[in-house]
Amino acid sequence: MSGPDHWEGPGRPGGPGERPRIPSPRAAAEDHGPLPDALPAPEPEAKPEPEPMTDATGPGSGRDSSSGSGSGSGSGHDSGSGDLPPEPPPEPDPLPAPAAPPHRVLKSLLGAWALAVCSAEETVAVETHLTDCASCADEALRLRDAVGLLHPADSLDLNPLLRSRVLEGCLVRRPARIPVPEWATPYDAETAKLDALLRDMGEAEWRAPVRLRWFEHERAVERETTVAGVIGHLMMVDGLVATALGLPDPLGADTPPGTPGPTTRTEAYWRAVGEEPGRLATHGPWRDQSYALIRTVSFAGSGVDELAVPYGKLQLAMCDSFLDRAFGCWVHAGDIADAVDYPYEPPAAAHVHQLVDLATRLLPTTLAHRRRAGLASPPQKLVVPGTPGRTLHLEVEGSGGGHWYIPLDSPAAVGAKEHTVAHIALDSAEFCQLAAGHVSPEEAAAGQHGERDAIRDVLFATASLSRM
């Protein structure tokens, strides 16, 4: 007999007429009981067992009446028609909400909440707690008010005017027994500012190239040196003031004969030590000399302001020499700051006014020198010394500005508003840059009105005040 249950597999388990044993299907996980956190599924109603089939089976066939068609699919239940699928298990209950943090944790978060650095969950928890806890609500209010008093981070660089403000405040409360003369305070302030800049610089920055600029006759002149070379130049020019006060000359035995001017002394110093002297050779000696100058004029008493200081062919009173050296220190400190890419602030407004006033007082003499050299137009009308003559009105705007009336025809004449024939308007910073030789005279004036020759002569004379 052949049929679906006939077995003819020689060499396999079972012999002729014997069906091999097929393992029953493995039970699924849910057959052993309900899933965790789920209600047990209701048991299906009992069904009557089907009657055994007789047409395709026989005694001894070894086939179970509940095993299906014998295809070996092994579903584990009768796949005949009429049976409904089991009902799905009910949805599990939602998880309970997490418990709120304890009071001590929420109190510790009040500072972070006031600074608005809590996470979203922490912010909700804290603000919910504040509606129920009066003590935490009061503390949160105080912290939030304190946050409003905080300031953003300030620059670590000190305000260059801080020293002057501190000294001014101290002197108001306790005047100095031996005060620094008013005409020496700009020099004191500018040397202190430059000293602070030099202290922040590294050794390599002292060798940075610096371009010095000034004006000679009708053209701009440039000279390149290093930061150390600039400090040596300042020390040599300050040395003219030092020798006038009886202090040692920093050039010593290398001083040229006669009465050398600033340029000659600087060239002699650079030849003696080289154009790239080190930091130790310049910074300390320059700062010590500036201290000595301030101390000496402070203890000298009255009359020292009228001492003459020779600048080669030119002479200045001691009070004007200190203003001149303050101006030179500021200008060259700006040259150094540009070379090392460092911000540098201008002098205080009161000091700028003193420096501009010095330049305007030197202009009539400078005009006379340029006329003798054929670089300026001749005077139109000579006047008796001490009487008013043709005048140019110089208006300097901005910090430290003011109005000055400059006599045009004679250095001994007096400038008068009613004799004005020309007017120039300049910003204070622009005027100082012109006097330093850093701005061309043709490009300097913001406003011009009146006689063109008078305006040109004054602008070129202002630029001629500059030197190395």
Image (cartoon, rainbow, N blue to C red):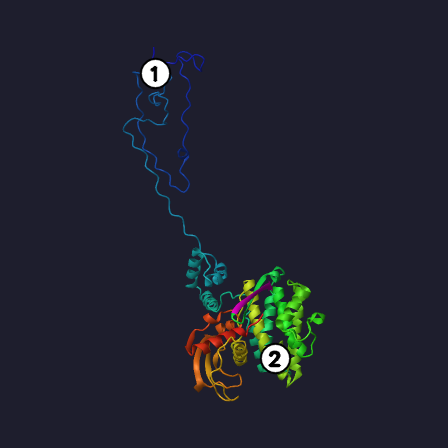
**Residue 391 at least partly seen:** yes
Give the labeled residue for mark 1: 4
Label count reads 2
**Residue 283 at least partly seen:** no
Disc 2 marks which amino acid? Gln
Quarter of the image with the C terminus is bottom right
Q: Is residue 142 above or below residue 183?
A: above
Q: Is residue 292 magenta?
A: no
Residue at 32%, 25% in the rendered image: 49
Q: Is residue 126 above or below residue 26?
A: below
Q: Is residue 55 left or right of residue 244?
A: left
Observer-nearest of 48 and 63: 63
Main SS, magenta residues: strand
Q: Is residue 222 magenta?
A: yes
- Element under disc 1: loop
Observer-nearest of 307 and 112: 307
Residue 280, by quadrant, is bottom right
Disc 1 marks which amino acid? Pro
Q: Which mark is residue 104?
A: none
Query: Disc 1 versus disc 2: distance between alpha carbons?
Result: 135 Å
Q: Identify the magenta region.
A: 219-226
- Element under disc 2: strand
Give the labeled residue for mark 2: 315
Q: Residues within 10 Å of mark 2 (few under 14, many from 20)?
A: few
